[in-house]
Image (cartoon, helix red, strand yellow):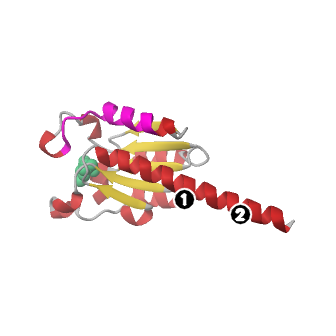
Amino acid sequence: MKIVVIQGPNLNMLGLREQNIYGPMKLDDIHAQMETYAKQSEIEVEFFQSNLEGEIVDKIQECVGEAQGIIINPAAYTHTSIAIRDAIKAVQIPTVEVHISNIYAREEFRHKSMIAPVCAGQITGFGPFSYHLAMVSMIQILSEIKAMQEAQNKQQASQQ
Ligand code: DQA
């Protein structure tokens, strides 16, 4: 099983960027923690960061046949990108949206997520720990899908 973690614009600046909002942790350190946790469930993780909307759309499309789950922090594109929303809807891969800050406690323009309606769920406001919660949620979703598929296979086999 593979999960792709997609990070949007300016998240490569974590550790430098607005530390009062995003804290001192760097993106690589967040990724290292996620990978350690995923390994315990024998899940492979790929990390991708881009400041470009089209590259994020390309990466989501490339997940078809490659990944069983997507964790995405679309950053500022959360609030504007119909293209990223359409890509998530198109690939039909379970997706968890994640934010470090609580987008609902900030400026009004951050209260609207274009992405949330096409995701399994949204995690927002727990600092870098949001990514851990997103990973826990994604692994839970994947294990539920696996259990459902196994039950279906068993039922089909018993009907033959
Ligand atoms: C963010 C919230 C967005 O509003 C903002 O544009 C970001 C980061 C977060 O993780 O809290 O770049 O997605």
Q: Measured from the top left, where is residue 26 in percent x and y?
A: 26, 33
Q: To which quarter of the image does residue 14 belong?
A: top left
Instruction: Please state which amino acid type lies under the numbered disc 2.
Output: Gln
Residue at 29%, 35% in the rendered image: 12
- Magenta span: 22-37
Residue at 69%, 62% in the rendered image: 151
Q: To which quarter of the image does residue 33 belong?
A: top left
User: Closer to us: mark 1 or mark 2?
Assistant: 2
Q: Which residue lies furthest to the right in this view?
A: 160
In the rendering, which numbered label is found on residue 64? none
Q: Residues within 10 Å of mark 1 (few under 14, many from 20)?
A: some
Q: How crowded is mark 2: few (under 14 residues within 10 Å), some or many (20 or more)?
A: few
Magenta region includes residue 42: no
Closer to the camera in the image, 40 or 10:
40
Residue 39 is left or right of residue 21, and the answer is right
In the rendering, which numbered label is found on residue 152? 2
The answer to whether mark 1 is within 8 Å of ligand 1 is no
Q: In this view, does 154 lie above or below 128?
A: below
Q: Can residue 45 be seen in this view?
A: no
Residue at 50%, 44% in the rendered image: 3
Q: Is residue 137 visible?
A: yes
Q: Measured from the top left, where is residue 43 in percent x and y?
A: 53, 40
Q: Measured from the top left, where is residue 148 in percent x and y?
A: 63, 61
Q: In which quarter of the image is the C terminus?
A: bottom right
In the rendering, which numbered label is found on residue 92? 1
Instruction: Please state which amino acid type lies under the numbered disc 1.
Output: Gln
Residue at 79%, 64% in the rendered image: 156
Q: Of marks 1 and 2, which one's residue comes earlier in the chain?
A: 1
Q: Measured from the top left, where is residue 7 in percent x and y?
A: 36, 43
Q: Quadrant of the N terminus?
A: top right
Q: In this view, does 110 lie above or below 5?
A: below
